[in-house]
Image (cartoon, rainbow, N blue to C red):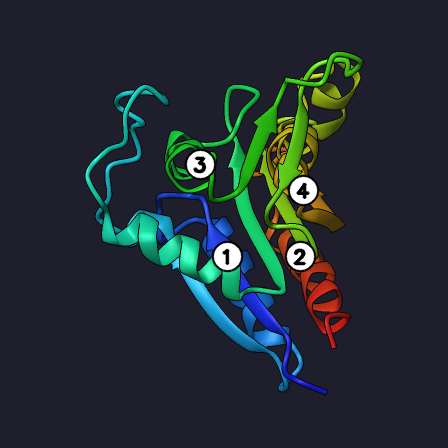
Amino acid sequence: MPAKHILAVLGHPDAGSFNHAIVQRYISSLPRDCEVRTLMLGELDFDPVLRFGYRQRMAPDPVVTRSQELLLWADHVVLVFPCWWTGVPSLLKGWFDRVLTPGFAYNEDNSGLLSLGMRTEKHLAGRTATLIATYHGPSWYFTINGFSPVRVVKHQILGLCGIRTTQTLQLSWVDSPKKDSPARREAFLDQVTHAAARMG
């Protein structure tokens, strides 16, 4: 069987964060027959601001071009990110805005008279994803209030482009003085290890 192509994307801008440890553990735990490419967004020099919306195209950006090439290459995408202010970091949101553009990741057609809303052509269909998210507070709070960043990424972003999420891991209370601990983090990293090992 051909090797599985894995693209790991770190959406936390701080290389010293626990999110960085998570993505490193995931990569090191993948089966040996997996080929891995990484995008550590905090280390990349690109403009995450979609400056004209969709009114006009921005100048070509090597990071955007490379990101799109890797998404086409990948069989499976791993996204690791913290949840801030009921959303993803601005760096990751900007990466979504600049990379998952109409024409590349999807196209929408609202010409159908009987359609409710738009019909979407999902250009990245056939790929799967793992989402690994951390929270400073309880993850259930975002879920019951309908503000879950993971749900938005899963359905409204990746799902719109055809990428199907098959694994989701979430850790609450990161950096909490009362609930966070090295042992708790290591237990979560063990979950990450098992999730990566299942990619074989």
Q: Which of marks 1 and 3 is in front?
A: 3
SS category of the residue bearing label 4: strand
Residue 127 is marked as 2
* Sequence-wise first label, 3 or 2: 3
Q: Horizontal and vertical percent for residue 93? A: 44, 32
Q: What kind of residue is marked 4?
A: Leu
Q: Would you place residue 11 above or below residue 78 in this image?
A: above
Q: What kind of residue is marked 1?
A: Leu
Q: Is residue 48 left or right of residue 83?
A: left
Residue 176 visible here = no
Q: Mark 4 points at which residue?
A: 171
Q: Give the Cα distance between marks 1 and 3.
A: 12 Å
Q: Is residue 181 left or right of residue 190?
A: left
Q: Horizontal and vertical percent for residue 197? A: 73, 73
Q: Please state which of residues 183 and 125 is positioned toward the viewer in this rendering.
A: 125
Instruction: Check the picture and name the quadrant holding the N terminus.
Output: bottom right
Q: Mark 1 points at which residue?
A: 71
Q: Residue at x 35, y 53 (%)?
A: 15
Q: Which residue is drawn at 27% across and 31% down?
A: 57
Q: Horizontal and vertical percent for residue 122? A: 64, 42
Res 114 → quadrant: top right
Q: What kind of residue is marked 3?
A: Thr
CB under 8 Å between discs 3 and 4:
no
Q: Give the Cα distance between marks 3 and 4.
A: 30 Å
* Sequence-wise first label, 3 or 4: 3
SS category of the residue bearing label 3: loop
